[in-house]
Amino acid sequence: MSVSADDLPYMTFIQACFLFFSAWLSGVLNSVAGGGGLIIFPALLLTGLSPINANATSTLASSTGYIASVAAYHDKLPAQQQLSWLLGGVSVIGGLLGAVLLLYTPTGTFNQLVPYLMLIATLLFTFARSIEILLKIAPETSQNSRSFLLKAAIIQFFISVYGGFYGLGLSFLMLATLSLLGIRDIYQINALKVLMMLCIDSFAIITFVVVGVIAWQQAVLMMVGTAIGGYSGAYYTRQLKPESVRRFIIVIAWGITSYFFFSK
């Protein structure tokens, strides 16, 4: 399985600075357009953590950024209260199942999967708009009907299982799902997205803590970084063009993905 928390490497000062900056940047990106996991997960790998430990640690580290983002977007959530409860509950269950699946995956297998998982996440982000079109629900479908809500819950369940297992590219799938519900306000979409990300991570984090696969030294440092980045990103970057942020993430993501393929 994964490396025990007692056997994890300690950080150097340079590594600590690198991880804090990566966490801050991840928090900013997650609050605006998603894709922060494409920064924080590889950063932990580059400082010596195994993939499973890095995945668990990045999940915990990202949570404070989501909390901060939800706080900054609090004025956008009341308008989608019913939807928040439905998809939030589904996200908790799916995230827990995904986390259990991760812990039963052999370390060697997960190591081999990392480049391909990174590629899937990068492709999801790059072609998010096309995915949205492919998943588009017929406009005549009532957004208040039980059948519509059931379809939305089923889609979110499978997205949440993936999120609990790995999570990279998760926000892009949720952005597409939320757009299917007819929500056009980008800030309402982001508010719901970070809320669901937090729900997915909640029980996954509990599972990782109980099993003991989190690198606490790195996690605490990065939790501070993602919290600062998440709040400042949600608060200040409303003035930025989301498409510009999206293009920046695409360049970084393809570079990191290429590195993991060629380093094997």
Image (spheres, helix red, strand yellow):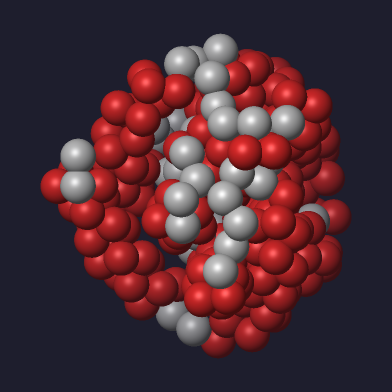
The residue at the point 85 percent across, 55 percent down is 78
Above-or-below relation of 20 to 61: below
The residue at the point 36 percent across, 65 percent down is 249
- Give the camera-side residue of 64 and 208: 208
**Residue 12's image quarter?**
bottom right
Asked if one can make out residue 224 in the rendered structure from this viewpoint, the answer is yes
**Could you tell me which quadrant the C terminus lies in?**
top left
The residue at the point 28 percent across, 38 percent down is 115
Above-or-below relation of 120 to 211: below
Q: Position of residue 211 (x, y in %)?
A: 73, 24
Above-or-below relation of 124 to 221: above
Q: How many numbered discs?
A: 0
The answer to whether 122 appears left or right of 29 in the picture is left
**Residue 224's image quarter?**
bottom right
Q: Position of residue 82 (x, y in %)?
A: 82, 38
- Give the camera-side residue of 68 and 147: 68
- Give the camera-side residue of 179 and 200: 200
